[in-house]
Amino acid sequence: MTAIDPTAHLTAEQIEELGRELDAIRDEVIASRGEKDAAYIRKVISAQRKLELASRGILLFSLFPPAWIIGTAGLSVAKIMDNMEIGHNVLHGQWDWMRDPKIHSTTWEWDHVSPADQWKHSHNELHHTYTNVIGKDNDLGYGIMRVDEDQKWHPIYLAQPLWNFINACFFEYGIAAYDLELGKNLHKRRRNNPEFRARARAVGRKIRKQVLKDYVIHPLLSGPSFLTTLAATFTANLVRNLWSHSVIMCGHFPEGVQTFERRSIKGETRGQWYLRQMMGSANISGSKAMHFMSGNLSHQIEHHLFPDLPSNRYAEVAVKVRALFDKYELEYVTGPLPKQVFSAWRKVFRLSLPNKKVKTPDRERELIAA
Amino acid sequence: MTSAALRSRAWKLLELVTTPLLPADYLDLVSPLRAGADLRGRIEAVHPETPDAATIVIRPGRGWRGHVAGQYIRIGVDVDGVRLWRAYSVTSPTNRADGRITITVKAIPDGKVSNHMVRKLKPGTVVHLDQACGDFVLPPAKPAKVLYLTAGSGITPVMGMLRDTEFDDVVMVHSAPRKEDVIFRNDLHDLVADEKLRLVELHTDTDGMLDIARLEELVPDWADRETWACGPAGLLDTAEEHWTRHGKAGRLHTERFRPTVVVAGEGGEVTFSTTGKTVDADGATPLLNVGEEAGVLMPSGCRMGICFGCVTPLKAGAVRDLRTGEITEAEPGVLIQTCVSAAAGPCDIER
């Protein structure tokens, strides 16, 4: 909902042509999907399990500082792999085509307090269908933040940088809460809805299992290293939460990413849907390791265009997608992680205050461009 | 506390540590064939039998319960990264000393799995198995005289029987297009040389198809023999008719390999087997809409093929992906996205 629509120069016919070109990119990947891709995900899953097992093993002796450091680092990486490159992508159905019941969106469960089926509903169905549509996409500010100039300011938003930081530290709980749509469902009338109560119980069970594993059983098994292992698992969860929160903030928050109004998506065509995904997402540039640790969500634009393509193929898809951005004169929002994280945080701070009378930097740039 | 109870306690504790995974998920990494694991097997060797058939030696997992001569197993193999299941007869005897089992596969034209198994399968590959099943088996009491009537790859279950149990008087009438197409030809002729088998080998490219009326001349005492027949539907149909006409239907045992031939079309009759509804659908309407209009409770989500909230088992028939035109055929475990799939011929959706 920026003042100037950056897609205004495209005709309806061009938008549909763009859609057809994107369909062709998708078809190419699907036609060449095969043994190598299957070997990739199995290798990643196997590596993650071995890393987690080894790290937890080392942490049994976490009283010794080197063991604590290595074990905590390993467990943090293992948890990030589980959530990002494996969990997020398996739950998207990216690997369903293998017909392996052990690596399938309908059977997978992850190291996260939000049960897989609830997350699939709020993420795959709501966020990916209504990407960046204010009021429909809960990922946008998670319902607790002001994310667009057009949203009415209220003094409560003054604290949103603090909310955002707390949310980052306990991100998995934040996600569980918003998968439950707690804000909406805690109203008196809805609180006793049996369907909501069943879902809340499922989250409770999942939290209990996760907490028992990380904060009771594993420390107990460590014997004299009880306290240091407790600190290690807490740290690993914190690292995982801060990391995934940062990566996910970079996907839709940085300056230059567009948001949309509810009425703008009425009767949306396939081409227009693609265009909204292109304008509503931002990438992170960086090394192969960076892409891997972000679960290839660094290719957020490509992921939003083709959420069900295997994540290991986004890098090659990105080259073709970027060429389409150039061809249709659209801005491909990307940058290194620190820059994008800074940009997202700056927006959180800026929107915590009422709109300035003077133009924001964003609009100035567009006015100059226009 | 008994040791079993202790073990189950220890296992429960282990589950608390490995959640949300199971201890088995970790054990599978190192020991996929262990007792208690899902039944799998490791390919140990692939021996060519004819230009288009091969015998595959499998070391089954510890959970393998053995088979009865003549039975088949379902085997799940990853072809181009996709798990596909097929059924093949066991061709090894039940008492094989090293505990290995063999299946013998004939590559059929355009057969995804059979061609992969005959030409590409590598020793060391882990495959997925089901326990043996099928009632095309030898009886516990030995019959005095036996006839095996086979054609093509129909020889495979019978080879399992021949290798397993010796009878005093065995005749085999086997048809194959040419000499070089006869699977197990050397083994059969070894049995003949040892006087353990009388073999009638017919080459249909030169001799023509077996005329069942010739049986009288080839095996004069056929009606006195307990008979096992396996081969193409044409052979089995005529055999059943022949044995029935002579009032000997009780002596004939048949096994049909039923390759499900799905003819993909545009639209077709859609059955929602759980609800018990059947409706006609065209080739352009997503099955999700077809089901909803018929009043079937269909799970749904984004309605555009991205969220996988609508996936539903396809029990029979074929569907076409409305985005790519790709055809998906029913197989056990195949799920389809109903919001972007249309009927490609008659199909059965498990809702």
Image: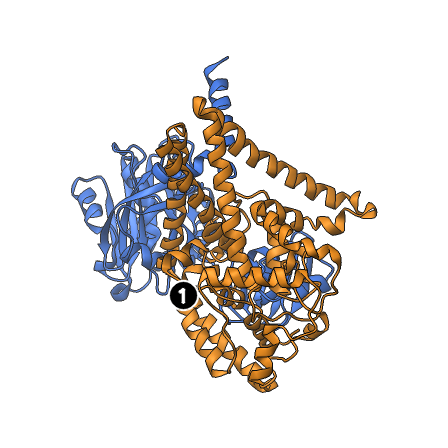
Task: Please name the residue that numbered disc 1 is placed on.
Answer: A315
Q: Quadrant of the N terminus of chain A?
A: bottom right
Does dot 1 land on a helix, a strand or a loop? helix
> At 21% across and 59% down in the image, what residue appears?
B180
Most distant residue in the top direction:
B1
The residue lying toward the viewer, choosing from A235 and B259, is A235
Most distant residue in the right direction:
A189
Give the chain ID for the orange colour.
A
Chain B colour is: blue
The residue lying toward the viewer, choosing from B255 and B229, is B255
Q: Report how many numbered discs are placed on residues in the image.
A: 1
> At 24% across and 62% down in the image, what residue appears?
B178
Q: Is residue B306 visible?
A: no
Q: Is residue B317 visible?
A: yes
Name the residue type under label 1. Ala
Q: Quadrant of the C terminus of chain A?
A: bottom right
Instruction: Name which quarter of the figure residue B280 lies in.
Output: bottom right
x then y, percent, for residue A230: 50, 31
Q: Is residue B311 above or below residue B254?
A: below
x then y, percent, for residue B226: 38, 41
x then y, percent, for residue B275: 69, 53
The residue lying toward the viewer, choosing from B182 and B195, is B182
